[in-house]
Amino acid sequence: MAERAPELAARALRTVPAVALLAAAAWRAGTLDISGALAGTLLGCTVWGFGGGGAFALLGAFFILGSGATRYGRGEKERRGLAQERGGRRSFRHAFANAGVGAGLALMAAASAAPGPFRLGIAGAFATAAFDTVSSEIGQVRGRRTFSLRGRPVPPGTEGAVSLEGTVAGLTAALGVAALGAALEMYLWSRVGWVAAAAVVGGFVESGLGATLGRRGLLGNESMNFLNTAVGAGLCLAFAFARES
């Protein structure tokens, strides 16, 4: 990567105007606060500059799906006391929690002579982030019955709780992100199912962490978001490297 560093850095810098404009639009729309817009610009330029336009498209797909799900049924969420704090504006903590793993993998893809596995990992990270956000936000509004992972009924909004409706919505979002990566020729269409499955596993790992460590105050929401994207990405990396061995 050392010999390509100037080229890659220049490519990342060329993305700054476009990414900053998108971040500013998200701030004006009330989706990001100032810190989130700045962090989003940094992460977006890293993903685009080092991972390519396809990787940035996956980041954008997650952001659009997650923002839409967060705004969906906001009045009902506020009535129940489940709405995202600060009107749904995401901070730099949210940005790094959801996109940090993908940005790191973009750097690894640029450094590798065989970037394919890392591109699949990027898809796994953003598909997991989409699954987690959409399933949680939609489940809070549309979930008829909410359960703990042990199958016990729990109130909506309980840490680690899942619902059928939320899970289906999250899976649809994950499949959308995974299919976009295949459509942009980042990997084969046969990998779409694996990316979506990895996203579901990552999401349920977070539910398990939320029901245990999160409920005890040992892990915050951002930490769990980062870990679940790492799990989704890691499963995709393991699959890719296993197929190549």
Image (spheres, helix red, strand yellow):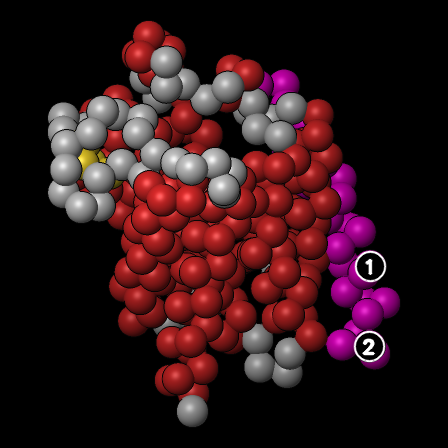
Q: Position of residue 15 (x, y in %)?
A: 73, 48
Is residue 71 found inside the magenta-colored segment of the image? Answer: no
Q: Amino acid at mark 2?
A: Ala
- Circle 2 — which element? helix
Q: Which residue is mark 2?
A: 2
Q: Nearer the viewer, residue 165 or 172?
A: 165
Q: What residue is rendered at 70% in x and 30% in y?
A: 35
Q: Is residue 213 above or below residue 31?
A: below
Q: What residue is rendered at 57% in x and 37% in y?
A: 94
Q: Nearer the viewer, residue 18 or 215?
A: 215
Quadrant occupied by the N terminus: bottom right
Tell me how far mark 1 sits from mark 2, CA to CA. Answer: 13 Å
Is residue 26 found inside the magenta-colored segment of the image? Answer: yes
Dominant secondary structure (helix, strand or loop) of the stretch shown in magenta:
helix
Q: Position of residue 110 (x, y in %)?
A: 67, 70
Q: Is residue 118 above or below residue 152?
A: below
Q: Position of residue 69 (x, y in %)?
A: 37, 29
Residue 132 occupies which quadrant of the picture? Answer: top left
Q: What residue is rendered at 40% in x and 68% in y?
A: 235
Is residue 59 visible in the rendered image? The answer is: no
- Circle 1 — which element? helix
Q: Is residue 165 above or below residue 117?
A: above
CB under 8 Å between callouts 1 and 2?
no
Q: Amino acid at mark 1?
A: Ala
Q: Which residues are magenta?
A: 1-30
Q: Which residue is mark 1?
A: 10
Q: Residues within 10 Å of mark 1 (few under 14, many from 20)?
A: few
Q: Nearer the viewer, residue 134 or 61?
A: 134
